[in-house]
Image (cartoon, rainbow, N blue to C red):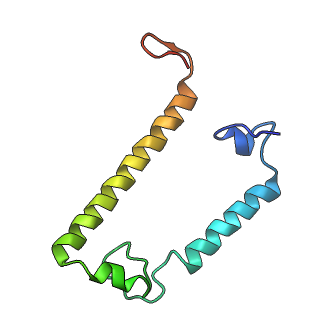
Amino acid sequence: SSFPNGLAAILGDNAIPKEGVQQILIFIGILEVTLMSDWTESAEFPGDLRNGTFEGAWNKWNDKQKLQKRAVELNNGRAAMMGILGLMMHEQIGGSFPIIGQM
């Protein structure tokens, strides 16, 4: 069977079972505590979660290139947030629009 989109997948009539939601949340919690934190406290900048790995790839660039790559990554994150907001609005608006038609 298929699950609905959005909040209906968690709160609706045909929602994902509670155990499945718990598994997802526990998995996210484990990732946050173990991999996605600066547990070595050696970060060069906020958001640097390498923890002593991937040194070769990052250290081959000069400071200007590093700053440019961080700016590109920040802008990609912003674009992804706008994209997901657009999808959420598309799901909630519904109805018919002159140019787009039936949603």
Residue in front for this viewpoint, 31 or 52: 52
Occupied quadrant, residue 47: bottom left
Q: Residue at x 44, y 85 (%)?
A: 53
Q: Residue at x 44, y 42 (%)?
A: 83
Q: With 38 as the anchor, is 10 left or right in this view?
A: right
Q: How many marks do you count on the picture?
A: 0
**Compared to 33, does 27 lie above or below?**
above
Q: Position of residue 101 (x, y in %)?
A: 50, 13
Q: Residue at x 46, y 36 (%)?
A: 86
Q: With 61 as the anchor, is 13 left or right in this view?
A: right
Q: Position of residue 84 (x, y in %)?
A: 48, 43
Residue in front for this viewpoint, 86 or 61: 61
Q: Residue at x 66, y 41 (%)?
A: 7
**Compared to 8, does 100 lie above or below?**
above
Looking at the image, the residue that sits furthest to the top is 98
Q: Quadrant of the image for the C terminus? A: top right
Residue in front for this viewpoint, 54 or 17: 54
Q: Position of residue 4 (x, y in %)?
A: 72, 37
Q: With 56 as the anchor, is 14 left or right in this view?
A: right
Looking at the image, the residue that sits furthest to the left is 64
Q: Position of residue 87 (x, y in %)?
A: 51, 36
Q: Quadrant of the image for the N terminus? A: top right
Q: With 32 as the anchor, is 8 left or right in this view?
A: right
**Compared to 13, does 25 lie above or below?**
below
